Image (tube, rainbow, N blue to C red):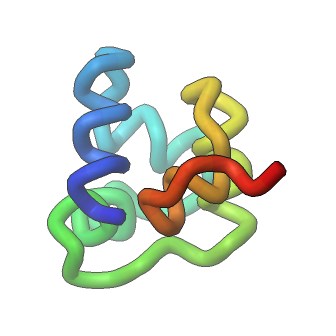
Amino acid sequence: MAARLDRALTRAGISSARAAKWLGVSEYDVQYWRRGITVPPLNACTRLAAVLHLDVHWLCTGQPPVA
């Protein structure tokens, strides 16, 4: 998940600090998610997917959306 999240944020031009502000978490939290040190909670994944126009299932699992 870390690689998908990092790639999506980078492509969108969104910094860890900006994502953290949107989500109400620390910048360190987002940096840890991007590095794969920790995993974001589902509510953060859902919000990130919406902001980045991604399927939450794909973001979390790397698998195609379930029909």
Identity of the residue drawn at 50% across and 53% down = 59
Where in the figure is residue 66, as x and y percent of width and height? 75, 56
Quarter-of-image position of residue 26: bottom left
In this rendering, the answer to whether 17 lies above or below 60 is above
In this rendering, the answer to whether 57 lies above or below 6 is below
Quarter-of-image position of residue 29: bottom left
Relative depth, front residue between 15 and 48: 48
Relative depth, front residue between 66 and 18: 66
Where in the figure is residue 22, as x and y percent of width and height? 61, 40
Say left or right for 23 vs 50.
Answer: left
Say left or right for 31 vs 9.
Answer: left
Identity of the residue drawn at 25% across and 70% down = 32
Q: Which residue lies furthest to the right in this view?
A: 67
Q: Residue furthest left?
A: 35
Where in the figure is residue 11, as x and y percent of width and height? 28, 19
Relative depth, front residue between 6 and 21: 6
Where in the figure is residue 31, as x and y percent of width and height? 24, 59
Q: How many labels does the image show?
A: 0
In this rendering, the answer to whether 2 lies above or below 39 is above
Which quadrant does the N terminus fall into? bottom left
Identity of the residue drawn at 31% across and 43% down = 16
Quarter-of-image position of residue 48: top right
Q: Residue furthest front?
A: 67
